[in-house]
Image: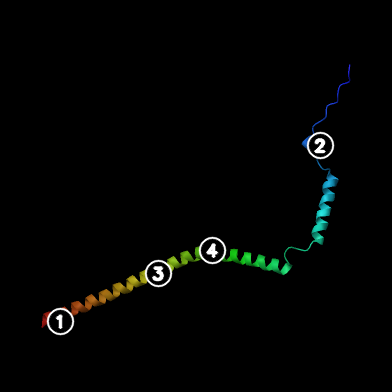
Amino acid sequence: MSEPVPRRRSPHPLDRLPTLTEVLHAGDATRAHRAQAPSAFPREALSEAVLAAVAQRLEVTLEARLRDALAPALARAADTLICEARDELAAALRDEVARAVHQEMLRARS
């Protein structure tokens, strides 16, 4: 009889997991490479890009918050103006009616 042929194991995905030391050494190499490689952006250009992005977001945010904060104050101011205008109009109308009645009374006496 012949000997059984050993079965070849199919590679299991977990058979080639890196060890902890391999991962740590790879991380060290990556950090060393980053430290030696020049930055994609010079520091000033990066600062300006970040500042521009923050300024744009800040402008939109401040505008929305300012609208939200001013809306009640503007509504109160508009209500006050409407009330004052109504009072002034009523006073002017009363004065005109009183003047017109006074003139008619004078004309009626004559």
Q: Which residue is mark 2?
A: 15
Which amino acid, mark 3?
Thr
Residue 29 position within the rendered picture, expressed as x and y whole percent measured from the top left: 83, 54
Label 3–label 4 contact, CB within 8 A: no
Residue 31 position within the rendered picture, expressed as x and y whole percent measured from the top left: 81, 56
- Label 4, residues with CA under 10 Å away: few <14, some 14-19, many ≥20: few
* Residue at mark 3 to residue at mark 4: CA–CA distance: 23 Å
Q: Is residue 89 above or below residue 5?
A: below
- Label 2, residues with CA under 10 Å away: few <14, some 14-19, many ≥20: few
107 relative to 51 in the view: left or right? left
- Is 21 or 37 nearer to us in this picture? 37
Label 1–label 4 contact, CB within 8 A: no
Q: Which residue is mark 3?
A: 80
Looking at this view, name the residue that lies furthest to the bottom. 110
Residue located 47% across and 67% down the image: 73
Q: Which mark is residue 24?
A: none
Q: Which residue is mark 1?
A: 106
Label 1–label 3 contact, CB within 8 A: no
Mark 3 vs 4, N-terminal side: 4
